[in-house]
Amino acid sequence: MRKILHTLIAVIAALPVALTAAAQSPVPIRYSYLSDGFAHISTERQRVEASIPFDVRLEKIIFPDGKSVSYKMELDFISPTAVTLPKAVKLSARTASGKIVSASQSYVSDGRSRSAFEDENGRILYWNRAQYVLEEAEVKLLAAGVELMEVAYNWSPDGFWQFTFKKNEFGSVLKQQLSALTLAPVPLSEIGDRIADYANRTGSITIIAKAAQCGDATVQLRYLYYKKNKREDFDLTLRLTPGRSDVLAFESPVVFTFTDGSQLTLPQQQEASNLIVLYPDADALRALFRKPVRSVTYQTTDGSSHTLDTGAEFSPELALQYNALLMVAPI
């Protein structure tokens, strides 16, 4: 198994950060970046259990004037059958207030809309992707409650899926995501060109961010996507300044200390010379740039501990690399 679970001490050290984040929003922010003056902030996907289960992801787009706002709602309908929704077919929803919200399919299929994956039971399923552009007032209507929704998947009179939400399953998810986007800070730094390599292989996709010097280490983040089960992984490396002769011990604790004194611990993933290699999950990775990191402490094979000054730029740089990778990620 490629990923090694975090040690108990890592979980305990990260707990205050996790609790703080949970108090702010129940839905993680997947990415947040500024590109050509447009701010893009997206939530992670959430599942809605319905007659056809589907995943929901809401993205907020803030225009360069800082006032105009639009939303992109992505729905991935999960089915054993691949379906391509034509552009401009309609979604219509009756909200709890009795008002109707209607939107047109805006997603142009590029193959990802029919991407297959294998679930935990070995079944081959498809994400049938639909994407709609909505005004803020429309999102707020949907978030207040949806009773009935019809989604056209072709142009025939009976080519639509119908969903009835007796417990407001869809509206409640949108409410959580809208709240998360409202709480999320607006990105201030342009994302720029930060991708060093993009490799699309038969079973996986690897995307590598450009390395950057942060204090006494060169930091680089790598994203891995496994097509078979749609799993995402991250590799984080910190290459120590040349001239050192430190051999880091396998599975030894690597401790990140934040400027407020709290800590997060991750295990070193290989015995390596002058190289910190970590496999953080998305939550741990986001924790490393939610608050500024002050230093990193690691252990060498002789049992001694060493502290690395990461500089004030570590957390902002990691955030930029993370968001640049997810900006071009396949899902």
Image: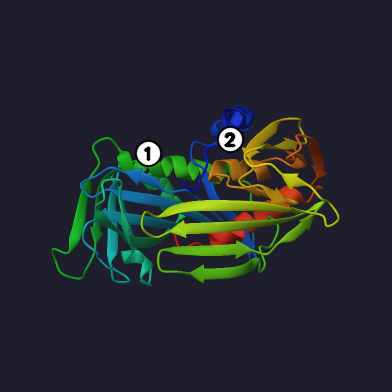
Residue 328 shows in the view: no
Q: Amino acid at mark 1?
A: Ser
Upstream in sequence: badge 2 or badge 1: 2
**As rendered, which of 186 and 13 lies closer to the eye?**
13
Task: Determine crowd level at label 1: few under 14, some 14-19, many 20+ residues with C-alpha closer than 10 A.
Answer: some
Identify residue type, mark 2. Ala
| Image side of residue 240 versus residue 324, left or right | right
State left or right for residue 177 relative to residue 35: left
Can the viewer see residue 37 in this picture?
yes
Q: Is residue 184 above or below residue 263?
A: below
x then y, percent, for residue 174: 40, 44
Residue 26 locus on image (x, y percent) = 49, 36
Mark 2 → mark 1, Cα distance in angstroms: 20 Å
Residue extending farthest to the left is 158
Q: Is residue 82 left or right of residue 36?
A: left
Quarter of the rendering containing residue 220: bottom right
Q: In the drawing, what numbered circle is on residue 172? A: 1
Which disc number belongs to residue 21?
Answer: 2
Pick the residue in front: 168 or 272.
Answer: 272
| Residue contact at pointers 2 and 1, CB within 8 angstroms | no
- Rendered position, 112 above or below 166: below
Q: In this figure, what is the number of numbered marks?
A: 2
